Image: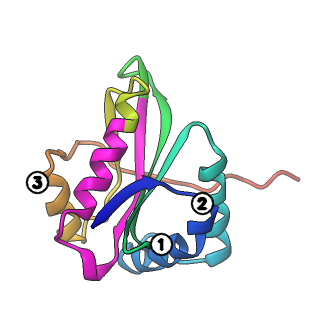
């Protein structure tokens, strides 16, 4: 039986392992265990974020996260979804959908009107997953730069 719940500190090793899997798929990111562990701790400690895991037989088999942002377009909170990943042996069994449903419920409880995410344009299985769940591409593109370090 698969169960979705909020993550806790004891899940860190399993979530880091899942992120290692995810970052082998995403060309824009390189796995760095210390950074991923630090980021997960920030999420666990934030009241503006939701970090969920799916487990089967007491083992973490999937995860996702969401962070509240303020959208002027929506006139209120929106949710930035990240780190949606399911262990390969459990894919195509509804785990990702259950994680996304739970994240959507969390968001709805906080007045969120729009969820948004970035997906690797070359990850056809992920793009198909999102399309089947009603996600639509936008005309926006993602740009990034790195902040200067303070001196």
Q: Which mark is residue 19?
A: 1
Residue that appears at 20% across and 47% down: 137
- Under circle 2, the secondary element is helix
Query: Label 2, label 1: how many angstroms apart (C-alpha)?
Result: 10 Å
Q: Residues within 10 Å of mark 3 (few under 14, many from 20)?
A: few
Residue that extends furthest to the left in the rendered view of this protein: 132
Which span is picked out in magenta?
Answer: 78-105
Task: Report whether 108 appears left or right of 45.
Answer: left
The image quarter in which residue 106 lies: top left
Mark 2 or 1, nearer chain start = 1
Q: Which mark is residue 132?
A: 3
Query: Label 2, label 3: how many angstroms apart (C-alpha)?
Result: 28 Å
Query: In front: 13, or 144?
Result: 13
Query: Label 1, label 3: how many angstroms apart (C-alpha)?
Result: 23 Å
Task: Report whether 88 appears left or right of 53.
Answer: left
Q: Is residue 39 positioned above or below 91 on the image?
A: above
Q: Is residue 144 positioned above or below 114 on the image?
A: below
The image quarter in which residue 72 lies: top left
- Percent x, y of residue 109: 39, 28
Q: Is residue 90 magenta?
A: yes
Query: In front: 78, or 53?
Result: 53
Residue that extends furthest to the top in the rendered view of this protein: 75
- Percent x, y of residue 114: 31, 32
Q: Is residue 82 positioned above or below 73 on the image?
A: below
């Amino acid at each position: 039986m698969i169960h979705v719940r909020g993550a806790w500190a004891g899940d860190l090793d399993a979530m880091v392992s899942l992120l290692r899997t995810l970052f082998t798929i995403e060309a824009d990111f390189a796995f760095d265990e210390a950074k991923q562990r630090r980021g997960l701790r920030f999420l666990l400690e934030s009241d503006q974020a939701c970090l969920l895991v799916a487990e089967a037989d007491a083992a973490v088999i999937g995860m996702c996260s969401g962070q509240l942002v303020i959208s002027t377009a929506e006139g209120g909170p929106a949710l930035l979804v990240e780190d949606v990943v399911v262990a390969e042996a459990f894919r195509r069994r509804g785990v990702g959908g259950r994680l996304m449903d739970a994240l959507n419920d969390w968001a709805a409880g906080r007045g969120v009107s729009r969820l948004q995410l970035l997906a690797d344009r070359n990850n056809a299985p992920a793009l198909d997953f999102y399309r089947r769940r009603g996600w639509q591409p936008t005309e926006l593109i993602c740009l990034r730069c790195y902040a200067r370090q303070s001196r």
